[in-house]
Image (tube, rainbow, N blue to C red):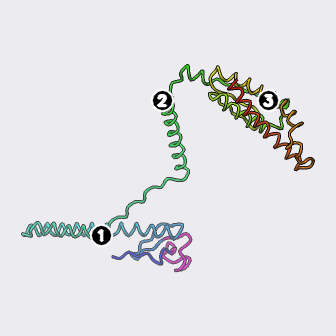
Amino acid sequence: MTHNLKHNGAAYNDAAALIYGATVTAGEGRALCSCGLLSEPLASGSARRAWHKEHKLTELDREITEEKAETEALFSQDVLTGTPADEVAEALAEIEAEAPAKPAKKAKVPSKKSQQRHDDYTAQMDARKAKKAAKKAEPEVTAEDERNAYTEHLTFTTAVADSMWRFLGRDGVTTLVDTAFPTVLAKPNNNSHVITFSGPVEDVPAAVEAVKQYWAEAIEAVKAWKETDEAWLARPKGGLEGRKASYFMTGEFYTSYAGKFAHNYVTR
């Protein structure tokens, strides 16, 4: 018996009559198979087509099972009359081969929300493992390490020359410390105008005092320089151009003075 879905899943009523027409597959109604079987009421054409697919496979499976049973019974009778057993087995194998394979079930795909929770959990566990591994790999802190981790902070105040932070507080200090105190690291903070010194406990205080001395001497030295330097006296005066010239020439003096101060500090 053939099993074909009528009108591609159009909706039928209880009396097997079309509800919306032969070309309309939407809407609630029953599916009708060519074998005459009606489905339960289903919400859409896709649901009716799914029902018929399952129905067709079920019916084909049932028909094959019945045919197989009939053949086994037939050959059982023939065996009694002398039919060879290998012919019986061959016939049964042919029936098995003709049976349509049932479609494999689709793999269940996790929802985006479930997948996100899984990914978050995995990331959290990976972070914990990495943290534990890093902790195990951390070298032991020795007394020498602690001695070299000494820090002090120095604030660049308006009393020094706040507008000259770039040259006195950042570039000048970096030049001085790098030259005269190679074991000390100076980190100027451009937002807070605070300089952090770190290094051996016996070197950091000396570096801080040297910077204070550099600031004091540089501010006094720039006054004398401005009275006698020909380039300074010949600079543009007034307006934006004049202000820029004064700012950068003064800054260059402070930075240059840091190098001279560091040289004198090392060689004294």
Residue lying at 9% horizontally and 70% vertically, measured from the top left? 83
Q: Give the residue type that dot 2 points to.
A: Lys
Q: Earlier in the sequence, mark 1 or mark 2?
A: 1
Which residue is labeled 1 in the image?
A: 63
x and y, in percent, of residue 66 in the image: 26, 68
Residue lying at 51% horizontally and 75% vertically, measured from the top left? 10
8 sits left or right of 231 in the view: left
Q: Local crowd at mark 2 within 10 Å, few (<14), some, or many (≥20)?
A: few
Which residue is labeled 3 in the image?
A: 215
Specify start and end residues of the magenta stretch as a single range. 10-30
Residue closer to the observer: 9 or 202: 202
Quadrant for residue 191, please give it: top right
206 sits left or right of 32 in the view: right
Q: Earlier in the sequence, mark 2 or mark 3?
A: 2
Measure the alpha-carbon separation of dots 1 and 3: 103 Å
Extreme-left residue of the structure:
82
x and y, in percent, of residue 229 in the image: 86, 39
Q: Secondary structure at mark 3?
A: helix
Extreme-right residue of the structure:
238
For the N terminus, which image quadrant? bottom left
Measure the alpha-carbon separation of dots 1 and 2: 69 Å
